[in-house]
Image: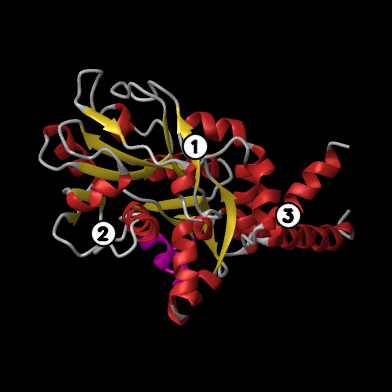
Amino acid sequence: MLKLIPRIINKLFIYIVLFLFAFSNYHTLYSQSLIMVTGDKRGNYHKGGETLKGFAEKLGISIELRNTDGAFQNLFEVGKNEANLGLVQIDVIAGFSSNNKETKKLVNNCYAIAPTDLEYVHIVVNNTSKIKKFADLKKNKVSLGSDSSGTAFTAGFLLAYLLNGVDLTAPNFINMDEEESLRKVVNGEIDAAFLTTTLNSKLLTQLGDEKTPIRLLAINTKEIPVKIKEMYHTEIIPQNTYPWQKDAVEVPATATFLLVSKQTDPKVVKNIIEIIYDNEEQLDNESHLWSSKASKAFEALKKIGIPFHPLVENHLKSKKDNTK
């Protein structure tokens, strides 16, 4: 028996080494801490971040949510490696890509992980204003959204392309917190406010009732210039989507993506990809941000040049092979 002790000790040592090696790999993979930039704490980006965080925690992945002004700021932070994950609209990505070398570098340091639900360009108008069509915004007091937000970027983009020669520095165009600007529209203090968000945002569902004197401004597909139709197409917001909305309205819609810094550990990125694409329905049900059709949208979006992380295609191919 005594002769066996050295052999047992050797085996025990090997098992301990193997255990420590396995634990080390486990710790590297599952004890990662990520930073995700979202948006206003009351908005859909933050709610979607909270939902993703809950799923990630089940794998031991910690996600710190940081509130920002929105997509514009988010792209800066992910592009500069100040955050791992961020939610950014396609028009903001396109704007950064074509602006200058520095902003293009920020885009080039990012991969898309997944599309979210479509975001709709809501232009909420007070019924007592003189705004009947998009061109009327030029002569009325309008909030474009918070400075550095995706809403403000989209508002400026659409105004510039649909109203040639419009002066976005004119005093009637103001940058204001989205919740505050919507409240001011209701009270008649300003004439209109932009808000780019998914359907059923609480900022809109809780804005008023059928007696509240506000409506959505329509923009039809013919008004969207051909050169920006890859970024914006029109969708119908059904009647009564919001308590105060009496009619169905055609508005521009744009795609939004969860971006990841290229410096983020691929092992953790793989886990985030699996969470999103393997739990599409549940994520969609728990927030108004994530899409239940992300897998279906992937192929179409890839064709128009969206730079997805290579692990996304690998995962979706593996899923497809496993269903055969």
- N-terminal of the two: label 3 or label 2? 2
Locate residue 196, reporting x and y percent. 37, 45
Label 3, residues with CA under 10 Å away: few <14, some 14-19, many ≥20: some
Q: Are marks 3 and 1 in contact (CB under 8 Å)?
A: no
Q: Quadrant of the C terminus?
A: top right
Q: Amino acid at mark 1?
A: Glu
* Mark-to-mark CA distance, 2 and 1: 26 Å
Q: Earlier in the sequence, mark 3 or mark 1?
A: 1
Residue lying at 53% horizontally and 56% vertically, measured from the top left: 226
Residue 64: % across, % down: 41, 53
Residue assigned mark 3: 313
Residue on which disc 1 sits: 235
> Residue drawn at (51%, 69%), measured in percent from left and top?
107
Q: CA distance from mark 3 to mark 2?
A: 35 Å
**Magenta part of the chain:** 72-84
Front disc: 2 or 1: 1
Tell whether label 1 touches label 2 (CB within 8 Å): no
**Most common secondary structure along the magenta stretch:** helix
The percent coordinates of residue 243 (x first, y second) are: 31, 21
User: In the rendered structure, does residue 91 fall within the stretch colored magenta?
Assistant: no
Does residue 70 appear in this view?
yes
Q: Identify the residue at the far top of this view.
A: 210
User: What secondary structure is found at the residue carrying circle 3?
Assistant: helix
Give the structural element (helix, strand or loop) at label 2.
Answer: loop
Q: Which mark is residue 147?
A: 2
